[in-house]
Amino acid sequence: MFDIAPRAALAAPTDPGIIRVQSAVILVASILACVGAGWIMASFMAFSNLRTFRHHLIFGLAISDCVMALNFLVSSSMNVGGRWIGAPENARFCSFNGFMTQVFVIQTDYWVLTIAICTYFVLADHKRSSSWVQDHLPVIWALPWLLSITWAAIGLGVTGYGDIGAWCWFTSDEVRLLVNFVPRWVIVAAMFLMYARLYFLLFRAHRHMASLEASGSLSGSGSRQLDTNGHTSSQPEMSGNTSRHTRKLKKLARLMLLYPLAYSVIWSLPTTIRIYQTITGEPAPWQIQTLDKACIVVQGFVDAVIYGATESSLSSWRNLFFPRKFPILNGNDGTVAPATTYGDGLDKARGTRRK
């Protein structure tokens, strides 16, 4: 059994100078995360082609990233200004800050898992499941909020939250490891399995279309096929666009594995530090702890790169300001196309109904 009683956190430095330096680093990381999340939200609101079912889920993730970053920004700003969040007079703020941290850290986990599951349902041809999730978007949106608030409230009642350095959270490394880090790695593993399955499905489709193009089988007329966005197209049209479709499939297949890989990279160091401090009972060097905290905080910026730059938002902004030079591109192959992305395909692919 491990001790869940509140105690001084090993991750919390005691030297005022170190606290200020660490909090300043977290403040910068928080601003980056806010900018990244804000970019995704602004793209969603500005461009109609970025309001597909998948983009609604990404928008929910961006909201969580933004609020989490603002929470870190407030606590780190207080430390930089000399209003220590660990001081007795700030105990109520610290409890609230820790509650918000727990809510939105695990909520981002639920969002990325939800995006992965819904993507898998649609692209793996689970017609009934994909239709249900797209027809019940409010329910899908409510689940991450309900689950994360419930778990954070339980944490507040059972163990409470305290100062861990630049913000407040569970002070026990054992509690954080079991409550946050182990479930996160389970989610990363589940994402990898789902996206790996989609990788093989998409890569098989890419090879099939390439072989049809090479053999000239797409040059017939009269029949209709399903393209990579889930739309039906005549074979002459498909024949003229096969190279674009095969490139899109190949790139989309690679992107499927980018998502769990990115989360594995940014959470490896924080997990290692939690294990080290749990086993040894000794704090890691404060420089390593600062990098550990920055990896957690910068997640909003990483999500902007993963889900923003690869989902046509970048090309949409360029097309807005430089319409002649930068036409709207397909989300995954970089070719000129109508305002339709892989996200649009999630709405219409495999016979689903929601637009």
Image: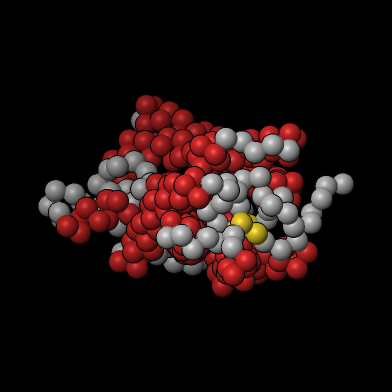
Instruction: Say above or below: 339 vs 257.
Output: below
Q: Residue at x 74, y 46 (%)?
A: 174
User: Relative to the observer, which residue lies in front, 13 or 169?
Assistant: 13
User: Relative to the observer, which residue lies in front, 21 or 114?
Assistant: 21
Instruction: Say above or below: 48 vs 323.
Output: below
Outermost residue on the left side: it is 324
Colour basis: secondary structure
Q: Position of residue 129 (x, y in %)?
A: 63, 59
Q: Position of residue 205 (x, y in %)?
A: 49, 37
User: Relative to the observer, which residue lies in front, 179 or 249?
Assistant: 179
Q: Position of residue 59 (x, y in %)?
A: 45, 62
Outermost residue on the right side: it is 1
**In the visual, does 264 lie left or right of 298?**
right
The tally of labels here is 0
Q: Residue at x 42, y 54 (%)?
A: 27
Quadrant of residue 43 within the rendered picture: bottom left
For the question of whether residue 104 can be seen, the reply is no
Q: Residue at x 71, y 63 (%)?
A: 160
Q: In which quadrant will I find the C terminus? A: bottom left
User: Relative to the observer, which residue lies in front, 18 or 163?
Assistant: 18
**In the visual, does 302 lie left or right of 336?**
right
**In the visual, does 40 lie left or right of 264?**
left
Quadrant of residue 151 within the rendered picture: bottom right
Q: Position of residue 262 (x, y in %)?
A: 50, 39
Q: Residue at x 14, y 48 (%)?
A: 325
For the question of whether residue 184 can be seen, the reply is yes
